[in-house]
Image (cartoon, rainbow, N blue to C red):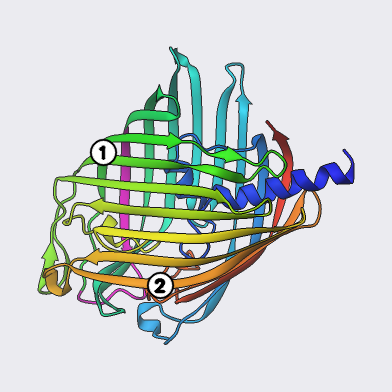
Amino acid sequence: MTRSAKLPFLAGLGCCLGWLAPASPGQSPNQFLTDLTDKRNPTLPYRSLFQVEAGMIGTTAASEDPAVGLEDGFSWDGHVYYRDEDFGERKGTLVGYAGRDGIYAGLFDGQLIGDQTITRLEFKARPWQFYRDGSYNGDTFSPNGLYEGSDYEGYLGFGREAAPGLFIEIGTYYRDHSFSTSPLTAGAFQIPEDFAAYGARVYLEQNTTQLDRRRGTPRDGGVVTIVAEQEWNDSSGSFGAPGFTTTLPDQIWRVRGNAEVYLPASDNTFWEVFLRGQWADRKDRVQNFEAQRPLGHQWAEGFLRLRIHFGDSWTLTPFVHGQWSRIVGAGGGSSTQEVFFGGGVESYLHFNESISLHGWYSFLDNESRPSIKINEDVHGEHMFYLGVVMRFGGARR
């Protein structure tokens, strides 16, 4: 392959990997896990790939308060990702991932049942979870209690294309939760008892994404995914702060969605619109307070990004970020709503077909942003990252 042929392939592969996890820089740093579990059939330019990314992530708080995790700090960040669409004699798809946000393994087989039905077996682990139980007083987060936990989930589903571009999948899952106190847990706060959950899950996905054949990046169309869950659990006992203790309902429902839209502005510039949100049972006091995403039983956020290609080796993507959250009020009172705004920039610089430099900066005027560490809850309104991406054995379609 000549140098002129390598660079377009390189730019496409590297930028596409940034697009593979468009949860956006800063909100969920390098959070591939959510995309791997929620998106059923992403449009990707490669059939096989092994990727390693490693770097440093940092945060600064507008006003430090170590008692609630608001402080300046640095930590490592990165992930390992593997995909093979010709796995085994049955030519199934094997996907593996490990990063700060969790661990994932998936096997997809279109021949086990046949009749164009895809059988999907998945395992997901999130060993380093943080929970921020509390409410907002204006743009200030007031915690009831901060604690840690982990969960492990197995899933079996069956899906098929119901119409051109429309994919439907139905499955069942089992998940085990455990919780522990952290140095930030108030002495009077009672954490939840460990419990197991199981339920049914339905996916609807409409995908019209078109790739730029020269770069391998999305240039037109988009994808919309809706996930609905009905869940049961064996939780027992009450938890919370004095004056506001609750129990987890035996049954819980939740609906979440993701949308991506790509609009070409010119041959080298593309508008990207990323939207995601969730509407869940108001009484789900565990998942509604997961710290790696917006807090509350109803939330939505959006990103407007302009991806600019400077030749075939450098990509710059400035973006604006908006977030809305509806959360139970202090002491379990009426729900309150908050709106947050911010922005930032992301960039890839490709040195050759195997190595790229990846960096981003993000600001959001929300005190509750994802933690930059796995062993303690450290976060702030400003976040930044710089790392190296290394790719091996990438095979284009």
Q: Specify whether 97 is left or right of 269.
A: left
Residue 95 drawn at (x, y percent) = 55, 36
Mark 2 / mark 1, whichever is N-terminal: 1
Say which mark, if any, is on residue 198: 1
Taking the spot 53% from the left edge, 51% from the top edge, the residue there is: 21
Which residue is under mark 2? 341
- Residue situated furthest front in the rendering: 266
Q: Name the amino acid type tagged 2.
A: Phe
74 shown above or below 174: below
Q: Magenta segment: does it hold 7?
A: no
Say which mark, if any, is on residue 123: none
Q: What residue span does the magenta drawing correspond to?
A: 172-188
Residue 28 seen by the camera = no
Which callout, 2 or 1, points to the residue nearer the camera? 2
Residue 87 drawn at (x, y percent) = 61, 25
Q: Name the amino acid type tagged 1.
A: Tyr
Tell me whether circle 2 and circle 1 mark residues in contact (CB < 8 Å): no
Taking the spot 36% from the left edge, 50% from the top edge, the residue there is: 151
Alpha carbon of mark 2 to alpha carbon of mark 1: how far?
36 Å
